[in-house]
Image (tube, helix red, strand yellow):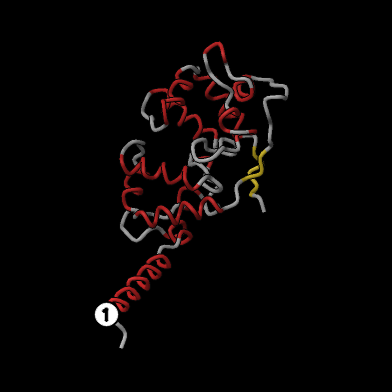
């Protein structure tokens, strides 16, 4: 006869396995989460996760799972404000957030030209991206976001291949203080030091660095 404690342990392990199997990131991406309000990601971010540029919805494919998880938790807590994403994030469980962010991180991102600070820079956007504006204490974008704005780790997301309208909206949000979920308000300082024309120029520059074709 099987001891009761072993039966309970086996049942608990089976429940954990079943729960893990039930939380499928791809299903959340394509169909939504289990709770009302947790709508499918592809509805706004595209079937390939590459975003919908005309609507200003960003690409999620290939972004760090840790970065995506932080943003969802910030939407949930109100540290980052968005009328669409806040209720959606609140409707996702911790397991669902973990599953869908891993799925998104594994999805292929766009091919990106790996430009660096060593190359010539022409035009306002390219100069800000590759040289910065050190007279205003604005570092070059690629110093944090990597060559070509490909993204670095969980703190610095990709800029290349994001819709220009999305990048403009985020820089303006940093600028007016409605977005402030980064350490030490680094992006707030940078955005406040840029003119509207400079914000548009640097956003256009990074939006055109990608071929918008997913890696195989």
Horizontal side of 184 relative to 154 (left or right) equals left
Residue 164 to residue 48: above or below? above
Q: What is the quadrant of residue 84 in the picture? A: top left
Q: Which residue is mark 1?
A: 4
Residue drawn 57% across and 16% down?
133
The number of numbered discs placed on residues in the rendered structure image is 1
**Does 58 appear above or below 180?**
below
Residue 197: give x, y in percent of width and height. 53, 19
Where is residue 183 drawn, in percent x and y?
42, 30
Relative to 108, say whether 18 is above or below. below
Please indicate whether residue 89 sits to the left or right of residue 111 in the image: left
Packing grade of label 1 (10 A; few <14, some 14-19, many >=20) is few
Mark 1, secondary structure of its residue: helix
Residue at position x 33%, y 36% in the image: 79
Q: Is residue 89 left or right of residue 116?
A: left
Residue at image location 61% in from the left, 23% down from the top: 125
Q: Is residue 137 above or below residue 109?
A: above
């Amino acid at each position: 006869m099987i001891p009761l404690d072993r039966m309970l342990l086996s049942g608990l392990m089976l429940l954990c396995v079943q729960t893990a199997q039930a939380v499928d990131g791809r299903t959340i991406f394509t169909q939504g989460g289990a709770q009302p309000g947790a709508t499918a990601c592809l509805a706004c971010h595209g079937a390939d996760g590459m975003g919908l540029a005309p609507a200003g919805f960003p690409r999620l494919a290939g972004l760090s799972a840790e970065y995506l998880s932080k943003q969802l938790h910030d939407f949930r807590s109100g540290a980052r404000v968005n009328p669409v994403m806040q209720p959606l994030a609140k409707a996702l469980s911790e397991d669902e957030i973990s599953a869908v962010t891993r799925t998104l991180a594994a999805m292929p991102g766009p091919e990106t030209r790996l430009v660096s600070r060593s190359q010539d820079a022409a035009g306002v956007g390219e100069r800000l991206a590759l040289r910065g504006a050190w007279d205003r204490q604005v570092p070059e974008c690629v110093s944090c976001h990597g060559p070509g704005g490909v993204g670095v780790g969980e703190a610095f997301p990709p800029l290349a291949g994001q819709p220009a309208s999305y990048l403009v909206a985020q820089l303006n949000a940093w600028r007016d203080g409605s977005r402030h979920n980064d350490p030490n308000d680094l992006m707030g300082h940078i955005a406040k030091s840029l003119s509207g024309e400079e914000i548009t120029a640097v956003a256009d520059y990074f939006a055109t660095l990608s071929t918008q074709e997913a890696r195989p």
